[in-house]
């Protein structure tokens, strides 16, 4: 009888210890690996979110920028890190593009990571130089069909989200345009303003000031819903390309087998932060929509995006840049 009591007490103590350990997460600083250089949109989201999570969870969230390899370097860093919830990847859209673009990744995007949450999405906007005689998507498609191969569109580089948004547009609209890759969004927008390219599928955040000043003309949003920043601007879906969606986004993931307790605590904390009016306004002022999905929802989102972009890459024949 005494031995049974002792066994029962031991089990109870182990359960209590496990519960206490789960409740104590995080009990030291958490590292956010951002696979881009400091100063970009993903870096800004990581730092803003990290500061708010520190308030909610009582630990520091430190941003570690690991740029290079088209986000592969930073992503591999997390895949090879201990699965303890203290090294996390701030996941950008190229995470789901690279599997179809790069034949040999040093990690498996689905099996080497634990999805936690989709943080936010940022629509792209189709913008043209004012000299282009098209004031909506219907007119742009008609122009491209009348002059196949004459219109050109710029991007931040081959294989990037705005390049593949252009390829998806061509496939769905049945048109042919010429892709002009640049080394970043800034030079692409500069040449668009200068009239050296006709259009760009660009993030709303950086394009908005040029739209507001009249230097660029917006034609449509690439998201399924209209943006609160440009509420009168229709989506491509509304403009006849049913189901068109190509957005920039950021999520959060840990290495494979990250403890479920850490995943749940982080996911719930991010959702709590994203309900904060100040945080929501901060994201929306930059043209971004807060999300805060469940781990299961984010896992499905990643699978669907990987499959979609693999199809677009195959159809377009896009290759990774140099």
Image (spheres, rainbow, N blue to C red):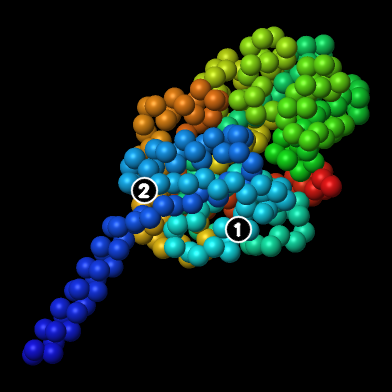
Secondary structure under the numbered disc 2 in the rendered image: loop
Report which residue position mark 2 lands on: 59
Can residue 197 be seen at all in this image of the molecule? yes
Q: Is residue 53 left or right of residue 81?
A: left
The percent coordinates of residue 158 (x first, y second) are 80, 41
- The correct choice, above or below, for 94 with respect to 174 in the image is below
Residue 77 is labelled as: 1
Q: 218 or 168: nearer the eye?
A: 218
Q: Is residue 69 left or right of residue 75?
A: right
The percent coordinates of residue 263 (x first, y second) are 41, 55
Secondary structure under the numbered disc 1 in the rendered image: helix
Q: What residue is drawn where x is 73% and y is 12%?
A: 215
The percent coordinates of residue 216 (x first, y second) are 72, 15
N-terminal of the pair, mark 1 or mark 2, is: 2
The percent coordinates of residue 79 (x first, y second) are 58, 61
User: How many residues crowd mark 1 within 10 Å: few (<14), some (14–19), many (20+)?
Assistant: some
What is the C-alpha distance between the residues marked 1 and 2? 22 Å
- The correct choice, above or below, for 272 with respect to 303 in the image is above
Q: Residue furthest left?
A: 1
Can residue 169 be seen at all in this image of the molecule? no
Residue 6 lies in what quarter of the image?
Answer: bottom left
Q: Is residue 281 left or right of residue 123?
A: left
Residue 191 is labelled as: none
- The correct choice, above or below, for 292 with respect to 198 in the image is below
């Amino acid at each position: 009888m005494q031995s049974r009591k002792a066994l029962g007490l031991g089990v109870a103590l182990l359960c209590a210890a496990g519960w206490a350990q789960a409740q104590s997460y995080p009990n030291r600083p958490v590292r956010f690996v951002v696979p881009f250089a400091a100063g970009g949109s993903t870096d800004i989201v990581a730092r803003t979110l990290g500061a708010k999570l520190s308030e909610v969870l009582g630990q520091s969230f430190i941003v570690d920028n690991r740029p290079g390899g088209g986000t592969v370097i930073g992503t591999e860093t997390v895949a090879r890190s201990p699965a303890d919830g203290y090294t996390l990847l701030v996941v950008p859209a190229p995470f789901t593009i690279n599997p179809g673009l790069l034949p040999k990744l040093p990690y498996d995007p689905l099996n080497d990571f634990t999805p936690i949450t989709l943080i936010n999405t940022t629509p792209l906007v189709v913008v043209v130089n004012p000299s282009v005689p098209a004031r909506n998507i219907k007119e742009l498609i008609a122009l491209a069909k009348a002059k196949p191969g004459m219109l050109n569109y710029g991007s931040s580089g081959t294989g990037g989200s705005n390049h593949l948004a252009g390829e998806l547009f061509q496939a769905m609209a049945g048109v042919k345009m010429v892709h002009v890759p640049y080394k970043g969004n800034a030079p692409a927008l500069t040449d668009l303003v200068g009239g050296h390219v006709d259009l760009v599928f660009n993030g709303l955040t950086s394009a908005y000031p040029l739209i507001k000043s009249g230097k660029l003309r917006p034609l449509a949003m690439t998201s399924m819903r209209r943006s609160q920043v440009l509420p009168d601007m229709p989506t491509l879906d509304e403009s006849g390309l049913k189901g068109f969606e190509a957005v920039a986004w950021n999520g959060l993931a840990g290495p494979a087998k990250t403890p479920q307790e850490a995943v749940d605590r982080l996911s719930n904390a991010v959702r709590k932060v994203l309900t904060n009016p100040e945080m929501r306004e901060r994201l929306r002022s930059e043209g971004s929509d807060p999300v805060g999905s469940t781990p299961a929802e984010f896992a499905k989102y990643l699978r669907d995006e990987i499959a979609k972009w693999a199809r677009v890459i195959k159809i377009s024949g896009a290759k990774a840049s140099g």
